[in-house]
Amino acid sequence: MGATVREDEVASEDDLFEQSEVAADYMEGLLDILDLDGDIDELVVGDRPQVEIVGEDLGGLVGPKGQTLEALQELCRLAVYRKTGDHSRLMLDIGGYRAGRRKKLAELAEQTAKKVIETGEVVKLDPMSAFERKCVHDVINATDGVQSESEGAEPRRRVVVKAE
C-alpha cells in the first residue's frame, strides 16, 4: 500500500508508473468483459500517469463528447486509489480522442484569441470538461493581448476570453 502524496510532495516516477499500471489492469479487465480488443500502453508524461488504448470499435468507450471516456477515467482513478491509497491525476485516452480533441481546441482557442484581439469583445465559450478548459487556457496564456478564466459550476463551467 503506497503512502498518500500530499499536495506539497511530488510522486516519484515509480509511483506514477504504478498508477498507470493499476489503471491499465483495470481497463484490460473491462475490455475483457466487453469482449473488445485494444492495445494498452502505460506511460508517465511529465508528472502525470497516462494510459492509452488503441484498437478497433472502441468509440463506445469514448461516448458522445467524450463523456464515457471521462467516466472511465474517474473509475480508473478510483481503482488506483483503492489499490495504492494515492489520489491520482491519471489521464486516460482511448483511440486518440484526447489528442485529436486537444488539436481542435487549440484551433478554437487561436481563433477566439484572434477575434477578441480584433474586436475587444469578451467571448464566452461553450461549457467544457476540465481537460478541455485546460487545453484552451494553455493556448490563451501563450498568446499576447488576451487572457482567460473559467466561470460557472460543473457541468456548465466554461472558458471566458478577454482582451488584456
Image (cartoon, rainbow, N blue to C red):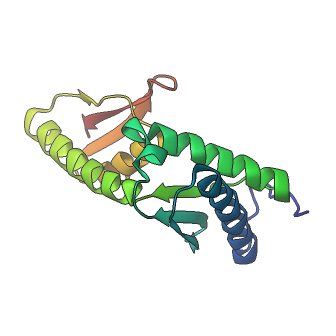
Q: Left or right: where does residue 86 sit relative to residue 123?
A: right
Q: Provide residue 34's location: percent of width, then percent of height.
A: 58, 50
> Residue reaching furthest left?
118
Horizontal and vertical percent position of residue 154? 52, 26
Expressed as whole percent of the image width and height from the top left, the position of residue 93 reads 48, 57
Q: Is residue 120 above or below residue 25?
A: above
Q: Residue at x 59, y 56 (%)?
A: 31
Q: Is residue 145 visible?
A: no
Residue 87: x %, y % from top left: 75, 51
The answer to whether residue 82 is left or right of residue 132 is right
Considering only vertical position in the picture, is 83 above or below 157? Answer: below
> Of residues 97 and 125, which is closer to you in this image?
97
Q: Quadrant of residue 1?
A: bottom right
In this view, the residue farthest toward the front is 35
Task: Inspect this view and state whether residue 13 appears.
Answer: yes
**Residue nearest the viewer, comparing 28 with 126:** 28
Residue drawn at 38 percent across, 36 percent down: 64
Residue sticking out furthest to the right:
1
**Residue beneath the point at 25% across and 51% down:** 104
Residue 133: quarter of image? top left
Q: Quadrant of the C terminus?
A: top left
